[in-house]
Image: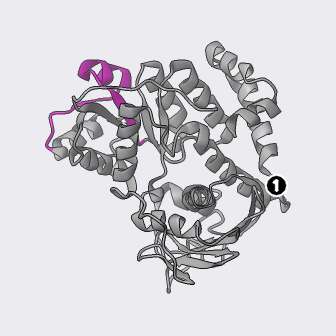
Amino acid sequence: MSPQFATIPGAEPLRLVVVGAGAMGRNWMHVVSETPGVELVGVVDLDAGAACRAVAASGTTAVAGSSLSVVAAETGADAVIDVTAPQAHRAVNTEALRAGLPVLCEKPIAPTVAQTMALIAAAELTGQLLMTSQSRRYYPQLARLKGIATTLGDIGLLTTEFFKAPRFGGFRDEMDDPLLVDMAIHAFDVARYLLGTEAQSVDCRSFNPSWSWYRGDAAASADFEFDGGARFVYTGSWCSPGLETSWNGAWRISGAHGSAAWDGEGEPVSEPAAAPEADPATGREEIAGALDEFVSALRTGTIPSGEVHSNIHTITMVEAAVRSARTGRRVALDGVLQAAYRAALAEEADDDLRAVLASWGSADDAIARLR
């Protein structure tokens, strides 16, 4: 299926409202202020005082408030950037979409696959773009690695190693699966980007080293099988001080005609030496790159890489990995999607959204339309 969404033609700057005035929200406000073609017109937070302080610190004339609908109406907003906690994403995104506002949402777009399906229904019902900011896709070196991969023939194995020891404090320390849910999602999404296919199954094991300062499992190894037979193996830890990898991890691709590697920071290398036929187009990195793609999509109608119909497969990889780690068995991703579709239908209280979900047909039909 090719998602359809309303575009915003014209040359006037897109008027953006940022929802969430915490540290990450302020990062987004700064990026918006540096981006041509957009304007920060509103900041929303349940704590109205926090929204006011964020606006004051930004040096803009944006309107601050605690209600998205009120601020959006007052400012004539064109779109929303959702930087709230994941548990609030479904409510915030749905409110924005129903108000006729496209949304760029921080990852994960929802805590579960079932909630992501409900958001897909909301996007389809309203005809608005809903996109996730999978910010680690936006590196020129990663684009060049993908280009090199096309010269390696059939890909047999893709691996990434991630070893860091951050002491965040706060909610991550109390999560059940901090590594898989809050960080590995980036690597899983990049694997989809590099391989250009979707995962079929996963065998994952997670654990918590004795010295870990996290309550939940901070280390894991996951073995995914992708369409076409390629394997993606992820090994990571969030409590491994010393010899740390970059935040992007260390990547290796093994193909029929050679191998390529990327340390997550410098330029990718390959043996035999290879380069893509044309240097891929590059732009700004991380959340700035996500914002640029969001704006381009709204202007042109081009489907962005983080569009919700596609991004659900990244969320499914995470949920399947967690389920595999807890059961000790390989998990099929189609089974996770089927269970999520049944749950989304059973849990949806809004008649309009439930009708959209029901129109997808059976669980197998729902999976087929998302492929």
Q: Position of residue 296 (x, y in %)?
A: 36, 39
Front-lying residue, 292 or 340: 292
Q: Position of residue 51 (x, y in %)?
A: 28, 37
Q: Is residue 314 magenta?
A: no
Q: Is residue 82 magenta?
A: yes
The answer to whether 165 appears left or right of 352 in the picture is: left
Front-lying residue, 92 or 352: 352
- Which of the 4 image quarters holds residue 250? bottom right
Residue name at image x 75 percent, y 40 percent: 337
> Quarter holding the C terminus?
top right
Q: Position of residue 34 (x, y in %)?
A: 21, 49
Colour mapping: one colour
Q: Which residue is mark 1?
A: 331
Residue name at image x 48 percent, y 66 percent: 277
SS class of the residue under badge 1?
strand
Front-lying residue, 240 or 366: 366
The answer to whether 14 appears left or right of 85 in the picture is: left
Residue name at image x 35 percent, y 32 percent: 299
> Quarter holding the N terminus?
top right
The answer to whether 82 appears left or right of 288 in the picture is: right
Give the residues in magenta.
59-83
Residue name at image x 55 percent, y 78 percent: 261
Residue occupying the far right of the picture: 329
The answer to whether 119 appears left or right of 297 in the picture is: right
Q: Is residue 234 visible?
A: no
Identified by mark 1, the residue type is Val
Task: Tell me if residue 348 comes above or below residue 29 in the rendering.
Answer: above
Residue occupying the far top of the picture: 351
- How many circles with numbers are drawn on the protein? 1
